[in-house]
Amino acid sequence: MNESLLRELVPAVIGVLVRRGADFAAAEDAVQDALVEAVRGRPDDSPRDPKGWLVTVAWRKFLDAVRADTSRRRREELVEAEPMPDLGEAVDDTLQLYFLCAHPSLTPASAVALTLRAVGGLTTRQIAQAYLVPEATMAQRISRAKRTVSGVRFDQPGDVATVLRVLYLVFNEGYSGDVDLAAEAIRLTRQLAAKTSHEEVAGLLALMLLHHARRPARTGPDSRLVPLAEQDRSLWNVQLITEGVDMLQTALARDRLGEFQAQAAIAALHADARTAEETDWVQIVEWYDELVRLTDSPVARLNRAVAVGEADGPRAGLAALAGLGPSLPRHAAVAAYLHERDGDPVTAARLYAQAARSAPNIPERDHLTRQAARLNAQLRS
C-alpha cells in the first residue's frame, strides 16, 4: 500500500471525520490508527479509492474509541463518589491494560502518554498540560508511541513505576480537571495495592485517599473553588484520612522513600491540622526538600515556594520562587499570592489577572479572576 499517498490524505480525512461529528483530537488519533492498520494489514495491496478506504477505516476506529470510552465511563459510574475498600468487586482487565500499554519497547514518558490516551481516556491537550509541554509536541509523542508498538507482541508488561505514573496523572486530571477520573484511579490503585507490597504503590494510594478526603470541601454551593486555607474541614472525610495515614505510615516504615510517599506525607500534615493556622509548615518545607531531592521537579519547587512563604514569610517565598521560570504553570498565581501577603496589592492584582488568563480549568480561572477583582476594588476605594 502506498503509505506516502495515504499520509498526504490525512488532513482531508481528518476534516471528513470532524464534519461527521468527531472532535479534532479524536479524528487525528483515529486516522493515525488507520494508517497503522494500512501498513500492517495491506502492505502490498493498494485500495482503488485510497481516500475512501482511509475514511472508512478511520471512522471505524473512531467509533471503536467512542465505544471504549463509553464503557470506561460506565465503569466510573459504578464507583461510589467516595470510594472505600471493596470486598466484592468484580475484577476487570483495565489494570492489565495499563501494564500492557507500559510496554518495555517504549520510553517511560511515551508509555505514560500512550496509556493516558488509549486507556485513561484523557485528551491530548490534558496530557500535554500534565507534562508541561505544547499540545503538538504531545500529539507527536503519542503518535510515535503508537507506531513503536504497532508491530510488537503485547506479552511483556511494563513495570510498576510507569503504571504508577499513569495512575497518578489520571487521578490528578480527575481531581482538578474537566473529566472525573479520580474514583477510577483510586479503584485501580487499590487493585494494584492488593497485588503487590511495593511501598510506592502504598504511597500513591495514601496520597490519593488523603486528597480525595478533602474533595467535599473543595467547592462551595455555587461551585466556586474553595482554597485549602478556607475549606470547611468538618466536611473532610475522616475515614479516608485515617486509612490514608495508616497506609502511609506502613510504607514509610520500610525506609525506602519515594516521591509518592513524600507527597502523601505533605498531604497528611495538611490533614492533621485542625485549622489552617495550625498547619506545620516547617515540616511541610522539609518534606518538599525531600521531594525536590527525589524528583527535581519544577512543580515541586513551585509548591515548596508557597510552603516557604508560609513558614518563613512571603519575602522568603518570593526568593524561593525567583529561581523558577515564569512560564511554569501556576507560577503567576503563586507570585500573586506571595506579593499580596507581602503587602503589594498592585502587583498581586496584575499577577492574579495574568494567572487567570492561563488557568487550566474554569473553576480555577474564575477564582483567580475574583481575586484580581477583589484587590482592584480595594485599590479603588
Image (cartoon, rainbow, N blue to C red):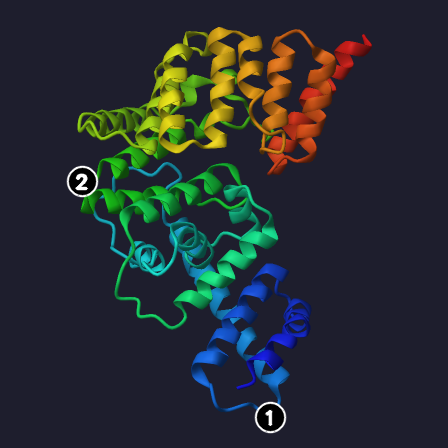
Single out the residue that lies furthest toward the right.
Answer: 380
212 up-or-down from 55: above or below: above
Q: Dot 1: few (<14), some (14–19), or many (≥20) neighbours within 10 Å?
A: few
Residue at the (27%, 39%) spot, across then down? 201
**SS at circle 1:** loop
Q: How many marks?
A: 2
Tell me the CA gap for discs 1 and 2: 56 Å
Left or right of residue 118, residue 5 in this image: right
Asked which quadrant contains residue 216, the reply is top left
Residue 361, given in percent of the width and then of the height, sits at: 60, 38
Which residue carries the number 1 mark? 48
Q: Residue at x 46, y 67 (%)?
A: 147
Q: Nearer the viewer, residue 284 or 5?
A: 5
> Of the residues shown, which amino acid type is indicated by label 2?
Ser
Can residue 204 be seen in the rendering of this structure? yes
The relative height of residue 139 versus residue 193 in the rendered view (above or below) is below
Quarter-of-image position of residue 349: top right
Q: Label 1 is placed on what type of residue?
A: Arg
Q: Nearer the viewer, residue 43 or 201?
A: 43
The C terminus - image quarter = top right
Residue sitting at 39 percent across and 41 percent down?
Answer: 168
| Residue 8 x %, y % | 65, 76
Farthest residue in the front direction? Answer: 323
**Quick one: 119 or 181, which is closer to the camera?**
119
Q: Position of residue 380 (x, y in %)?
A: 82, 11
| Residue 91 drawn at (x, y percent) | 25, 55
Q: Report the residue marked by disc 2.
A: 197
Q: Secondary structure at mark 2?
A: loop
**Which numbered disc flags the more N-terminal residue, 1 or 2?**
1
Residue 274 makes an appearance in the image: no
